[in-house]
Amino acid sequence: MKPVRAAARAMLGAIFVVSGVRVLADPDSKVAAAKKVTDKAGPLIERIDPRLPSDARNLIRIKAGADVAAGLLLATGRLTRPSAAVLAAGLVPTTFAGHPFWAVPKEERQQHQTHFLKNLGLLGGLLLAAADTEGKPGLKYRTSHALERSQKSARRAVRTARREAKIAAASAVAARKLPG
């Protein structure tokens, strides 16, 4: 891994690890803000499976744990694309629940707008990390080129077999003409 890529991933993952640990230590501090999202998501989760936790406090803890785990994976360069995708998916509801600058009093709007834009920048970095193949071809490219290589190989084998068949036929004709 290139040093710049490693440093960027470590810096990007660090904020999620630190904030996730803080939230795990005190999930109740985020319950009021999270209720805006969890009150809408809770019934959906209950319809999927009633055994899944759907209350705000547990959903906050699950998200914080996912942030810590995915942040550590991203920072250490392990499973970077999936971990960046997990962090990006979790950042969207957090941003809308925690920093709705359009729904706060005018005197608080600037601070919320700054946090909203910061999270938008983090989301951009996470999307880049999720799409980053580290300079190696992606799965789609590798699959299509493997198919092309196998088709070329098959055509080459057919040409070789035809050429060898012609040589064998010519050898057989020549052998019949020889006395003996």
Image: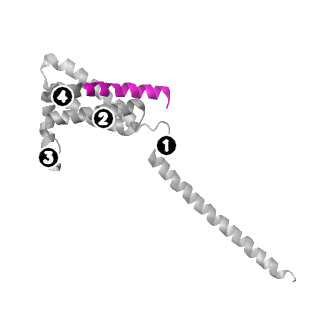
Image side of residue 90 versus residue 159, left or right = left
Residue that carries the numbered disc 1 in the rendered image: 137
Residue wearing tag 2: 88
Q: Tell me the CA gap for discs 3 and 4.
A: 21 Å
Which of these two is toward me, 6 or 137?
6
**Labels 3, 4: front one:** 4
The reply to whether discs 2 and 1 touch (Cβ–Cβ < 8 Å) is: no
At x 63% / y 61%, what residue is drawn? 156
- Does the magenta run of residues contain 6? yes
State the image quarter where residue 131 is shown.
Answer: top left
- Secondary element under disc 1, as helix, strand or loop, is loop
Residues tagged 1 and 3 counted as in contact (Cβ below 8 A): no
Q: Where is residue 69 shown, x and y percent of the image?
A: 32, 34
Q: Earlier in the sequence, mark 2 or mark 1?
A: 2
Is residue 91 visible in this depiction of the protein? Answer: no
Q: Residue at label 3?
A: 46
* Image point (13%, 18%), residue name: 106
- Residue annotated with mark 4: 27
- Magenta stretch contains residue 73: no
Badge 2 density bin: few <14, some 14–19, many ≥20, Cα 10 Å: many
Label 3 residue SS: helix
Question: Mark 3 vs mark 4: which is more N-terminal?
Answer: 4
Q: Magenta stretch mostly in which secondary structure?
A: helix
Which corner quadrant holds the C terminus?
Answer: bottom right
Q: Amino acid at mark 4?
A: Pro
Residue 80 position, x and y percent, is 40, 36
